[in-house]
Image: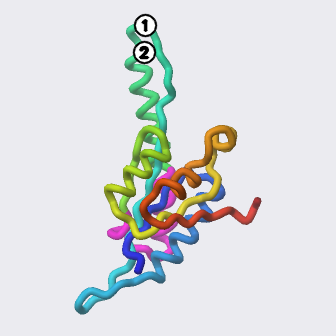
Amino acid sequence: MIKKILFPTDGSDDANAALDVVNELALNFNYFMIDKTIKASVILVNCYKMPEIYFSDENSHDYLKKLEEKLEKQSETILNSAKEFLEKNNINSRTIKLKILSGNAGNSIKYAVNKEHPDLIVMGRRGLGSLKSILLGSVSSFLLHHSDCPVLTVTSKER
């Protein structure tokens, strides 16, 4: 039984294809408690990583703060877009939770998995960081090997 789905997204084509799957799962996996039917809840996750930049002048703190605010805003935009899609497709907004995380995406998502205890992770197979993933391995690959819950990866039809 699937009660909770964790959906890490970067807004890529594969992530958007995975969002379609999340929508179908959330609509079709219900569980029953006493006298009511409850739909699966969805946790939308986006991670941003601050670049490792070091400045020697006194204005660097302000620059880094503005950069972090911009990255958080981008994360909010990605998550709100996914939330709006789910709401338009009859997923109750009370069953949707948004999480913005910072740091290494794989480790941050694994942290969210350990904290939220989802029954399933649904994510795109490839994200926006394709060159880095070729060299270091993808986030989906990391979670397939290090997560304590099942991971469903989805590829967009445009591949």
Q: Position of residue 96 (x, y in %)?
A: 38, 65
Amino acid type at mark 2: Ser
Report the residue at 39% width, 65% height from top.
Answer: 118
Q: Which residues are magenta?
A: 78-96
Q: Quadrant of the N terminus?
A: bottom left
Toward the viewer: 55 or 83? 55
- Given contact means CB atoms under 8 Å apart, are the residues at marks 2 and 1 in contact? yes
* Residue that lies at the very extreme toward the top in this rendered image: 57
Tag 2 residue: 60
Secondary structure mainly formed by the magenta segment: helix
Q: CA distance from mark 2 to mark 1?
A: 6 Å
Toward the viewer: 63 or 44? 44
Numbered disc 2: secondary structure:
helix
Tag 1 residue: 57
Amino acid type at mark 1: Asp
Numbered disc 1: secondary structure:
loop
Is residue 116 toward the left or the right of residue 10 in the image? left
